[in-house]
Image (tube, helix red, strand yellow):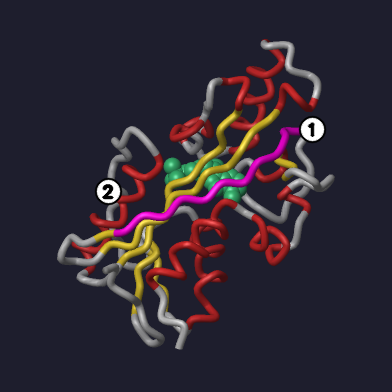
C-alpha cells in the first residue's frame, strides 16, 4: 500500500521550474502540507535521462528525497504534438534553450507545424502530459499520470501561465491556458488530473 502524507508533514517540491512549484503549491495548499522548493534547499537538478515522463519524474523525486531526507514530489511534464510524432515531449524544456525562453520553443513548434503544412485545427492536435512521483528517503515511490487534449493556436495569447500555455487551447474551450485564471486551469489541466490520482492514494483526507 502507498505511504500517505498527512497535514503538517513537510514535502519537497522537486522542481526548479517556478511555474510548476507554484501550481503544485496551489494544489497542495488545501491539505495543510508544508511545501519547500528544491531551489530553496539548494538541491542539485538531476539530469533527465529517463525514456519517458514517468521515468524522469521518478529519478527527480528519488534524488530530492534522498538528498533532503524528506518526502519529495516531482513533476515531469511536457507538450506532445500529434503531427510532430509526439515532439517536443520529454524534451519540452530543452526546446526553450539554455535561457529557458519559451517564446523560442513555441516558435520552434510553430515552424515545425508550418513545414508540415499543418494549418487546420485537426492537424494541430496536441496534449500536455504530467507524471507526478511521490518518493520517500528510503526509496519507495508511486507515480501518477494525467493528460489534457486540445489544439495549438498561433500567435501565442495570454500571460497567466508558463511554458507552452499561450499556444494551447483545451478541447471545448476557445481561450488558451495562458489566458485562463489559475483556478480555471487547475480544474482541467494534466497536472490537476495527475494530482487527483496522487491525492486519492497518497493524501490523507482528514
Ligand atoms: P520538465 O518536466 O522539467 O522536463 O519540463 C517540462 C516543460 O514542459 C516545462 O518547462 C514547460 O515548458 C512544459 N510544460 C509542462 N507543463 C506545462 C503547463 O502546464 N503549461 C505549459 N507548459 C508546460
The secondary structure that most of the magenta stretch takes on is: strand
Q: Which residue is mark 2?
A: 59
Q: Residue furthest front?
A: 1
| In the image, residue 190 above or below residue 138 | above
Q: Is residue 148 left or right of residue 32?
A: right
Span shown in magenta: 142-155
Q: Which quadrant of the structure image shows residue 83?
A: top right
Q: Which quadrant of the structure image shows residue 139?
A: bottom left
Q: Which quadrant of the structure image shows residue 141?
A: bottom left
Q: Which residue is mark 1?
A: 155
Q: Can I make out residue 39 in this image? A: no
**Residue 31 position within the rendered picture, expressed as x and y whole percent measured from the top left:** 49, 81
User: If the image is split into quadrants, where does the C terminus sit?
Assistant: bottom left
Q: Is residue 98 left or right of residue 171?
A: left
**Residue 9 position within the rendered picture, expressed as x and y whole percent measured from the top left:** 34, 82
Q: Is mark 2 within 8 Å of ligand 1?
A: no
Q: Nearer the viewer, residue 130 or 110?
A: 130
Amino acid at each position: 500500500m502507498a505511504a500517505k502524507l498527512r497535514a503538517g508533514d513537510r514535502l519537497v517540491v522537486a522542481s526548479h521550474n517556478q511555474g510548476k512549484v507554484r501550481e503544485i503549491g496551489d494544489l497542495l495548499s488545501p491539505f495543510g502540507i508544508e511545501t519547500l522548493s528544491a531551489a530553496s534547499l539548494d538541491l542539485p537538478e538531476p539530469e533527465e535521462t529517463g525514456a519517458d515522463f514517468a521515468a524522469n519524474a521518478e529519478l527527480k523525486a528519488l534524488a530530492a528525497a534522498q538528498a533532503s531526507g524528506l518526502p519529495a514530489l516531482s513533476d515531469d511534464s511536457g507538450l506532445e504534438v500529434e503531427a510532430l510524432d509526439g515532439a517536443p515531449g520529454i524534451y519540452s524544456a530543452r526546446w526553450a534553450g539554455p535561457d529557458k525562453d519559451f517564446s523560442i520553443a513555441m516558435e520552434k513548434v510553430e515552424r515545425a507545424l508550418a513545414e508540415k503544412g499543418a494549418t487546420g485545427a485537426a492537424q494541430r492536435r496536441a496534449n500536455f502530459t504530467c507524471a507526478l512521483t511521490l518518493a520517500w528517503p528510503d526509496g519507495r515511490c508511486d507515480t501518477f499520470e494525467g493528460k489534457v487534449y486540445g489544439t495549438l493556436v498561433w500567435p501565442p495569447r495570454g500571460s497567466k501561465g508558463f511554458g507552452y500555455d499561450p499556444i494551447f487551447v483545451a478541447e471545448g474551450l476557445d481561450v488558451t491556458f495562458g489566458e485562463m485564471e489559475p483556478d480555471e486551469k487547475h480544474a482541467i489541466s494534466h497536472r490537476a488530473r495527475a494530482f487527483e490520482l496522487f491525492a486519492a492514494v497518497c493524501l490523507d483526507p482528514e
